[in-house]
Image (cartoon, helix red, strand yellow):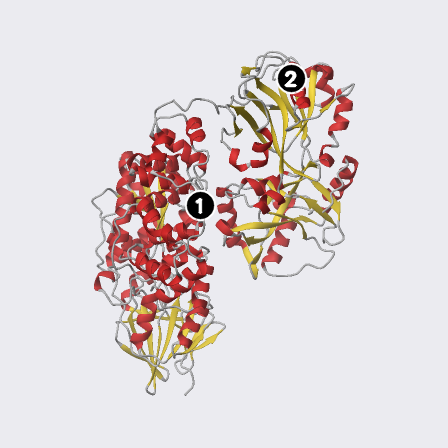
Amino acid sequence: MKRFAALYADLDATTATNEKVAALTRYFRQAPEEDAAWAAYFLAGGKPRQIVPTQLMYALACERAGIDAWLFDLSYEAVGDFAETVAHVLPPPVGQSGLGLAEWVTDRLLPLRGADPATQRARIATYWDELGRDERFLMNKLITGELRVGVSKLLVQRALAQAFELDAKRVAQRMMGYTDARATPSAARFRALVSASEADGNAGQPYPFFLAHPLDVAQDELAAHLGPPADWIVEWKFDGIRAQVIKRAGQVWIWSRGEELVTERFPEVASAAASLADGTVVDGEIVAWKDGRVAPFALLQQRIGRKVLTPKVLADAPVAYVAYDLLEVDGADLRDKPQRERRALLEAMLVRNPAIGLSAMETAESWDALARLRATARARGVEGFMLKHRESRYGIGRRKQEKGGGAAWWKWKVEPFAIDAVLVYAQPGSGRRASLYTDYTFAVWNRMPRDASQARDYVAAVARREAPSADALQLVPFAKAYSGLTDEEIGDVDRLVRRTTVEKFGPVRSLAPSLVCEIGFEGIARSARHRSGVAVRFPRILRVRADKPLHEADTLISLQRLLLAGQADGASGGC
Amino acid sequence: MSDLVVARPEGLYCPPGGFFIDPWRPVERAVITHAHGDHARAGHGHYLASRASEPVMHVRLPGVRLQTLEYGETLRQGDVSVSLHPAGHVLGSAQLRIEHRGEVWVASGDYFAAGERDDPREHNRTCAPFEPVRCHCFITESTFGLPIYRWAPQDAVFAAIDAWWAENARNGRASVLLAYALGKAQRVLAGIDSSIGPLIVHGAVDTVTRAYRAASVALPATQLVTEVSDPSVLRRCLVIAPPSAQRSPWLRRFGDLSDAFASGWMQVRGARRRRSVDRGFVLSDHADWPGLLRVIAATGASRVIVTHGFEAAMVRWLAGHGYEAGAFATEYGDLDDDP
């Protein structure tokens, strides 16, 4: 337990991926196999069912700490994590446990499940007394089943591969099912995970993904760059997760573009693909799918973050697989065949067995006609077009090919709406982001400021808590955005929020305006309920514009213009 | 009998004595418990503080009209007699004892007392340790007034800082420890093993450190970064800088570095992550929860008034344990700052 607690502290102490992998690698090399087996299980997202009810731990912790429930609750508010709060409030330990992680889990914690409450209480109290604060914290995490330390399954696989000099994709294959709630990690299973033997074969190996380039060419130059549209296969570009579906030797593997094995995360795709013939590899996109059409990526995101897929999650955020390329048939590699041939084979295969969806093709006489069609992308819930040259082979990565206008695959996306707006309110997020200011309200000027000094005067008035008169220059809130920043940027903005707070209203802070961000959104509609007169769909922060002075932020007029453009665009924006 | 200390817009006020305690707005007469910026502000007519705080008061508030008292020395102020007693927080920090016709009140200022029992090993080694003073009413701070705050033995914290520094030095990178320039920085200097490598202090830390040395506090030799001629020093030194230096251009000269923050707030994992530093060392100059409860009991006070920190939690706990408890709203130590 000590060694695992030290690993956890190391992982917790850094945000750098390389350092995390290094810490994991050291641990996997040094820890006894049975402990490493459990560590890999927990860190890769394995979760035994809750061992003891939280309520029992809560009552016991209050009792052992000699504090009332209200004081525990206040403490929890300050900490934001149950397991950690318990670890802090308990009195110092009286002994020291030298048991390893595996012994702790199998001999001590798991047997608590189903024991009578009196036994549970007595044992947990004894265990707490044997552990220092960090180990107690981990013990509580293991019991409540919510160990999270910013390590993904992918990172664990990378570390195992590094520690035992293996190919990470092979480790990923071997890890399938490793974190199942029903499977118990053991030294033998860990040995199988990191064995140097290649007897388990290459059945699940994906092909390197062929990646598209963004098309950055003016509409009237498309013909000059790309030749006639008839040379191209034109498909809608889905906002989903690029994935290869592999069916070989009676088994299905799903690999995401990051070469992460995601079979277990998309059970509906895996079961649909089970009916494909052995020796088949399909390339396509996993998309959120609701009411017979592609749903926004935001819905898919609800799935991505989940380590446990409850029936509710599966029902709320269903997915579908849309195929657009065929890389292998009857075990034969098709990648050197032209795109049109692979497409024909794919269509033929899915006609015989429509197990998975097929990406539709669009045709038009001219690039101008395609451009007009592309303008309807928003209404269709897609990002624009994919252009694939009919004669192109399936390449590797983003490497360009000589034929067909440089690269053979182009993404021709519609631009998101974008507005430069000013941060005016902030409030803390939840979970990992509790008490970190991550939820922001952005505003635009009601009219264009005359100059920098007029904007400064307004900021000074806000700082003095003066309300502007209705017709005076002011910032009008128009969107809330929760995402789009890196952790480091969030840290910076958090400090800025604390520094520039004018007033606190419950959890919300009003700020002296100082920061401009570019806000992107997918749709815009009139709204009588919003002071700005508009409501936007899926606003997010495209980037922080630290370079942009306040007085150059956009205005209500800019939003009105987008509103008109959005209607012409076909975006109906039902907010 | 009426209260010896009341809250006024300018700060805490002693009506029979005619003076304010650590006022946040300019007043004629101010008693200053210690030299931190939120307690010792500029602009008052007359200052009274401990003799031991004199060197740091001169650094922080040069040129003010300062009268000093030895710890325990009594002075008549209006209708009351006042004396100052060690608070263990920073050099010269003091509790203010006020006596008026047999009634005794003590205002703690900020104080440092760790653990359920008074253990000399846990005293602040850079100033006189906290001494409980018997009183009827005790005005206490509550910066860490929640049971989640229990300080580990300080030598364990210094050992952890040493290990982090030594590891960084082995890997050829600087260790930058962010610590409050007055008090915390000197406590770190006094606690760490200076044989591990060179010690560099930020200018803001240097000024205060000189004042500590002038007061005969033993601290290891330090240098300013401008005094470093051998560039290899920058790759194995421990740098002590105020929290405001985090990600500042000043730090760029150290190249690849590991940073850490020394503060009681580092106790909580979320706070550590929010700080975005590589390491958080739980080192505080404030009383922890068991320390607060011990001190309150030791004063023998039946009435307790709680200031800056987790007032609501402390007041409720005290009321539930038979004390007459209340709170004063003050403008000390906004939780977002770095005590």
Q: Is residue A25 left or right of residue A278?
A: left
**Residue drawn 30% across the image and 54% down it:** A132
Residue A125: tell me if it is visible: yes
Q: Is residue B117 above or below residue B138?
A: above
> Is any part of residue B202 visible from this angle?
no
State the mark number for residue A47.
1
Q: Is residue A7 above or below residue A356?
A: below
B23 relative to A524 in the view: left or right: left
Q: Residues within 10 Å of mark 1 (few under 14, many from 20)?
A: many
In this view, A145 is above or below A289: below
| Closer to us: A467 or A257 | A257
| In front of the other: B85 or B214 | B85
Nearer-the-camera pick, B287 or B186:
B287
Give the x, y percent position of residue B30: 39, 72
User: Helix or strand or loop: what does disc 1 sit on?
Assistant: loop
Which secondary structure, mark 2? Answer: helix
Say whether disc 2 or disc 1 marks the residue closer to the N-terminus: 1
Residue ID for mark 2: A345
- Could you tell whether A456 is left or right of B328 in the image? right
Q: Quadrant of residue A112?
A: bottom left
3D distance between C-alphas at marks 2 and 1: 42 Å
Q: Residue at x 67, y 22 (%)?
A: A352
Q: Around disc 2, counting alpha carbons within 10 Å, would you say few (fewer than 14), some (14 to 19), or many (20 or more)?
A: some
Percent x, y of residue A49: 45, 49
Chain bearing tag 1 is A
